[in-house]
Image (cartoon, rainbow, N blue to C red):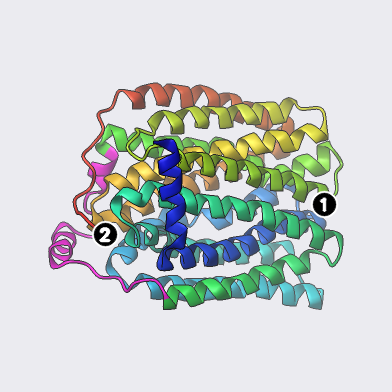
Amino acid sequence: MPASSFADSLHLLRSRRFGTFWCASLLSSVGTWAQQVAQPWLLLSLGASSFLVGLDAFAMSAPVWLLTLPGGVLADRADRRRVIAGFQSVQMLCPLAIVVLLVAGGLQPWIVILLSLVVGVTDALSMPSFSSIVPSIVERRQIPAALALNATQFNVSRVAGPALAGIMLATIGAIGCFALSALSYLPFIGVALWILPRHGRSDAATGQASQAGAFAGLGALYRDRYLRGALLTTFVSGVLCGPLITFCPVLVREVFHGSGAQFSAAVATFGLGGVAGAVGLLWVDPRRDRRWLSACFAALHGATLVAAALNPLFWLLPLILGVAGASMSVTNTSSNALLQTAAPAHLRGRTVSVYMLAMRGGLAIGSLVTGALVAHFGIRETLLVNGALALVVQLALGLAWSRAPAPTPGAGTGRA
């Protein structure tokens, strides 16, 4: 059965819609990760403090608290192609502005943070549309495999993006990373307009959504112990473990006195671990309950922060980050698959928005609080506390989650 599941998963890449979407997403993610690696390093080079690095990550993630749920409504009620293409076009202008300001010599940390806020706002409004595309172009039984493949491309980009960023940082500087990021938006925007299906809902689904209201069903989603377990596991992981990558440049620069190329190499191993985790999920029988996968790897993610805090040698850091990448990939992808498989089709956009709120909202809080703690207590001490707390909390959540009855998958057959 595992070999059959793996073969069926890879077969998805040969389908016209999903295969093209996957390739365009990969190119876009490579550019995004090149920028994500370069941006905190650029801020430190501009004289920003550790707190400002955390504030930058907070500005990019915080809008999810206000705008992700409206973004979920937008995903359920609007043409997702146009939503994605419009907001991605606005995002493309942000790295382009940084390139222009770097050339002109007028870039300041506050400008970078302001542009991160613009990206955060557009991300919050468009990510539910983006994330609900995958279930709309595959069969319901294929959703876990399709999400695992999507996580694979995202984590492949975590290898390729930092690798390219390391080369550029060592040669032409951060400007190359931001130029690559701006260009990488173009193929994805084209695919969104060309190959993705127009958003269509059945009359029954439309009626349900209209009668129940914009945020119908979300209270029931949280009250369900099974689905709440997925959301809480993702949220806690974002708050306590997400800052490991956000503050990795601080760890490399201040503790190990490393270079930009060394930082990029370390982050690339995080991507390699993520690839390994996502590919491993392709071998899992789609009928298997993935709660323990998510919960156990969430606890392991906490343990990697403890290891990073206590680690005295730089060459061990990439290995630790590799395990962290695998842990985060398995945790979040499994939780996302549980939520999207159980969600009714007419509420899928809003279900995704709640998942994004847990993941990105948790990261926003974690980045801001961790940035303040790092400024006062140091990077090692803060990571140690975050990791130990995550390990204990995730194990407790996992035990409670395992006792919850699994819900009946969302209504609908055929294409989700």
Q: Is residue 385 above or below residue 362?
A: above
Q: Which residue is mark 1?
A: 261
Q: Nearer the viewer, residue 6 or 407?
A: 6
Q: Is residue 202 left or right of residue 199?
A: left
Magenta span contains residue 213: yes
Quarter occupied by residue 138: bottom left
Q: Is residue 287 left or right of residue 180?
A: left
Residue 51 x, y percent position in the rendering: 69, 47
Q: Is residue 153 above or below residue 371?
A: below
Q: Is residue 151 left or right of residue 314?
A: left
Label 2, secondary structure: give it: loop
Q: Measuring 69% from the left and 51% from the top, which residue is drawn there? A: 53
Query: How dense is the environment of label 1, judged by Cα within 10 Å: few (below 14), some, or many (20 and up)?
Result: some
Question: What is the three-letter code of the residue carrying label 2?
Answer: Arg
Residue 415's disc number: 2
Q: Which residues are magenta?
A: 195-222
